Amino acid sequence: MKKSLLVILFSIFNSLLSAITIYRPFNNEDINSVPCYLRILDENNTDVTYTYANASYSWYDHPKYFYYYKNKFYLYGGQIMHLKIKPGKYKIEFYTPKDKTYPFQYLKKTEWKSNSYYYDTESDLVILYVSPTADDNYLYNGGWYIDHKTPKFFYYTVPKYYDFN
């Protein structure tokens, strides 16, 4: 009896959340192994990542199998995040701590950050993409770019040119 009540309450709570899917396309093997972590900020710039949202993930090559995150919400190359969030307006960002940038030792000086993507759960948007950034020579420069448009592909996702200055 208690279990069924808990399932019903969870279902009701889950139905009140808005859903968005975030893709991190494949790149080369090295950058695929660098995780990017999700950060969600409310209108007061308060981090609400783990209080207003829940998430699961799947892989491009097995999109029907879902896994729940145990601690932090992150993406590796080829991973898909299924995010449910309370209705509202948010700033979505991704970051990689300095100690997680292996094998890019030359970019280990600072935390990798993304642009901020402003998301309103009332919009029709249901898919975002996050991809690594590069300089004008297409060399990774230690950042992430969030967009609602599919990134360009060659053999892998073409890194997004983004100047952090």
Image (cartoon, grey):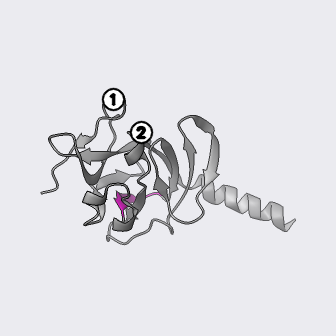
The percent position of residue 125, horizontal first and vertical second, equals 40, 41
Above or below, 151 relative to 163: above
Identify the magenta region. 87-96
Q: Amino acid at mark 1?
A: Phe
Residue marked by disc 1? 153
Q: Residues within 10 Å of mark 2 (few under 14, many from 20)?
A: many
Q: Is residue 94 in the magenta section?
A: yes
Task: Please give the residue where the numbered disc 2 appears in the rendered image.
Answer: 25
Query: Residue 112's image quarter?
Result: bottom left
The C terminus - image quarter:
bottom left
Compared across the picture, whether 153 is left or right of 29 comes to: left
Q: Secondary structure at mark 2?
A: loop
Compared across the picture, whether 81 is left or right of 110 comes to right
Q: Is residue 124 visible?
A: no
Query: Badge 1: few (under 14), some or many (20 or more) residues near its Cα, within 10 Å?
Result: few
Please report the residue visible at 25 percent of the width from the left and 41 percent of the height from the top. Answer: 160
Above or below, 5 relative to 64: below
Can residue 21 be found in the magenta stretch? Answer: no
Magenta segment's dominant SS is strand
